[in-house]
């Protein structure tokens, strides 16, 4: 008996194709993330890394609500830093539901202390709600790139300031500098340290808007921008 033209069969075939495409995309993202992680770890193992402010950050993260902020072009090394130097701290990174987000999410979940808050790329309000909810539940440290996911580079988005005001969390700055590095041709000028170079990592306790007379969103943006390096060298 021919099934061609049967709407039920067509619907079933469409569902199978969609499921197969999703599985293929997930497998591709996992493979890229796995290879990237291996290559990055081999690269970082050749470098001399100096870390400042780690103990203070770990102590603060175990007692208080924390949001870790860093510029988008520093995200590649951040995963390695947190897994190697703060393994006792659980964290969740806000990641969009894009294809690039799938790769980043796979990398984050490959670390024991990492998870993600996945949101549709265009659902900014939901992203903000989920971020605030996670921080208030104190399940771990929330990681945000204030200028992500598409820039402009080195610009603080209003949502980050709103999250800081609503959660009253401690905003901790994570930054790293390398003596020698590559700068990729991306919107954020993504940076990767070159082999056998020196890297300086800094955790800096920035600010907490937990006092009376909180600033406006615009003022909070300005304050947060001041505590992050404007254009890391």
Image (spheres, grey):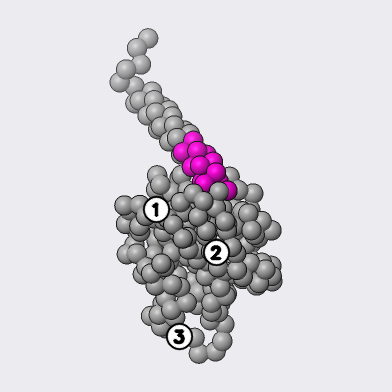
Q: Residue 215: x and y, percent?
A: 45, 85
Q: Which residues are magenta?
A: 30-45
Residue lying farthest to the top in this orientation: 1
Q: Which tag, 2 or 1, sits closer to the chain's start?
A: 1
Q: Nearer the viewer, mark 3 or mark 2?
A: 2
Q: Circle 2 sits on which residue?
A: 201
Q: Residues within 10 Å of mark 2 (few under 14, many from 20)?
A: some
Instruction: Kindly identify the residue that appears in the image at 40 percent across and 80 percent down.
Output: 222
Residue 173 in the image: above or below residue 130: below
Q: Residue 224: x and y, percent?
A: 45, 76
* 70, 233: nearer the viewer: 233
Q: Which tag, 3 or 2, sits closer to the chain's start?
A: 2
Q: Circle 1 sits on which residue?
A: 182
Q: Circle 3 sits on which residue?
A: 215
Q: Residue 31: x and y, percent?
A: 49, 35
Residue 67 in the image: above or below residue 74: below
Q: In the image, is residue 158 part of the stretch drawn in magenta? A: no
């Amino acid at each position: 008996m021919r099934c061609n033209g049967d709407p039920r069969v067509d619907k079933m075939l469409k569902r199978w194709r969609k499921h197969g495409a999703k599985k293929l995309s997930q497998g591709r993202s996992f493979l890229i993330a796995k290879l990237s992680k291996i290559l990055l770890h081999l690269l970082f193992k050749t470098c001399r890394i100096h870390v400042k402010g780690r103990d203070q950050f770990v102590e603060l993260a175990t007692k208080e609500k924390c949001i870790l902020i860093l510029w988008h072009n520093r995200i590649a090394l951040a995963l390695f830093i947190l897994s190697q130097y703060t393994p006792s701290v659980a964290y969740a990174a806000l990641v969009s539901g894009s294809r690039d987000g799938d790769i980043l999410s796979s990398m984050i979940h490959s670390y024991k202390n990492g998870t993600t808050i996945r949101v549709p790329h265009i659902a900014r309000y939901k992203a903000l709600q989920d971020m605030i909810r996670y921080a208030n539940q104190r399940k771990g440290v929330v990681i945000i790139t204030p200028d992500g996911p598409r820039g402009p580079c080195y610009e603080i988005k209003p949502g980050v300031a709103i999250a800081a005001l609503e959660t009253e969390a401690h905003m901790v700055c994570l930054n790293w500098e390398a003596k020698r590095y590559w700068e990729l041709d991306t919107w954020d000028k993504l940076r990767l340290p070159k082999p056998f170079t020196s890297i300086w990592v800094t955790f800096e306790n920035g600010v907490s808007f937990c006092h009376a007379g909180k600033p406006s969103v615009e003022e909070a943006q300005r304050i947060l921008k001041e505590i992050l390096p404007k254009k890391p060298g």
